[in-house]
Image (tube, rainbow, N blue to C red):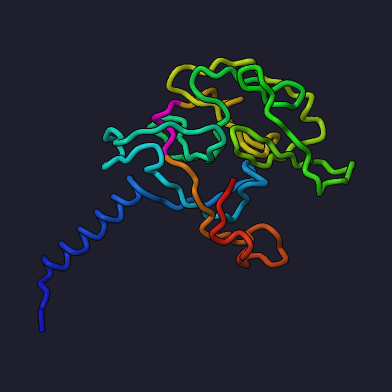
């Protein structure tokens, strides 16, 4: 029988902790969605898997990325507002370096072209406070939530600086995003949301704490 010494156990624990931190820094992390700012795509109680190597692999938080790539239009990303902040946000990339973005009469325009936008076919209640729309761009589509008077809210035009991105929440009237923050530096985008690992009902009193099985291991668009 092999007897491990205290120093061997400490070494094993240290290596395990280092490996776990390496995974968290460089590869994947799980984050809980606390608010409705990305509804209907991501909802409170979702736990999402973030691929931190999506835009380049980093051995440590401060090392230069290897095989760096750029966020695509429509990517759901994890970001910080500055390097010293401990707060992370999840938003959707809707403008890239040198793009000109504008919101006009409720439509998102990129370089003067309005994104194709369709009202969700299952929503027929004219008295509803919020409406669901689908936006289409570059072969991708995603859903957004808007208030009835969203068409009255305009923004821009804004030319995005080199090396920066414009991000929006999918819940367009209940989110803080680049309309308030300004554009986001590429270095502050820390990964791409790739999976809803699990989802728990945290809000409704009926069924609170229950698993949302229909969202388990689903890929957010």
Q: Quadrant of residue 45?
A: bottom right
Q: Nearer the viewer, residue 161 or 3?
A: 161
Q: Nearer the viewer, residue 200 or 66?
A: 66
In the depicted structure, whether residue 41 falls above or below residue 150: below
In the rendering, at what x and y percent does residue 25 appear? Answer: 33, 45
Q: Which residue appears at 55% of the width and 52% of the height? A: 219
Quadrant including the N terminus: bottom left
Q: Quadrant of residue 100?
A: top right
How many dots with numbers? 0
In the rendering, at what x and y percent does residue 165 appear? Answer: 50, 26
Identity of the residue furthest to the bottom in this view: 1
Q: Which residue appears at 75% of the width and 27% of the height? A: 106
Identity of the residue furthest to the right in this view: 126
In the rendering, at what x and y percent does residue 53 appear? Answer: 37, 43
Q: Which residue appears at 51% of the width and 58% of the height? A: 197
Q: Nearer the viewer, residue 139 or 131?
A: 139
First to last magenta residue range: 185-190
Direction from residue 65 to residue 5 in the image, left or right: left
Quadrant including the C terminus: top right
In the rendering, at what x and y percent does residue 209 appear? Answer: 61, 66
Direction from residue 86 to residue 217 in the image, left or right: right
């Amino acid at each position: 029988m092999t007897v491990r010494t205290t120093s061997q156990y400490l070494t094993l624990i240290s290596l395990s902790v280092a490996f776990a931190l390496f995974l968290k820094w460089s590869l994947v992390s799980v984050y809980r969605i606390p608010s409705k700012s990305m509804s209907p795509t991501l909802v409170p109680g979702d736990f999402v898997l973030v691929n931190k190597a999506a835009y380049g692999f980093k051995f440590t938080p401060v090392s230069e990325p290897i095989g760096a790539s750029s966020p695509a239009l429509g990517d759901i990303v994890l970001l910080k507002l500055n390097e010293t902040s401990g707060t992370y946000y999840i938003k959707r990339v809707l403008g890239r370096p040198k793009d000109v973005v504008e919101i006009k009469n409720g439509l998102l325009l990129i370089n003067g072209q309005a994104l194709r936008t369709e009202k969700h076919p299952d929503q027929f209640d004219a008295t509803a406070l919020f409406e669901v729309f689908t936006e289409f761009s570059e072969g991708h589509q995603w859903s957004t939530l808007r208030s009835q008077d969203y068409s009255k809210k305009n923004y821009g035009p804004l030319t995005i600086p080199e090396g920066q991105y414009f991000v929006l929440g999918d819940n367009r009237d209940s989110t803080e995003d680049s309309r308030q923050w300004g554009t986001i530096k590429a270095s502050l985008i820390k990964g791409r949301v790739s999976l809803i690992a699990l989802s728990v009902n945290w809000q409704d009193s009926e069924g609170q704490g229950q698993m949302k099985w229909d969202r388990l291991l689903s890929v957010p668009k």
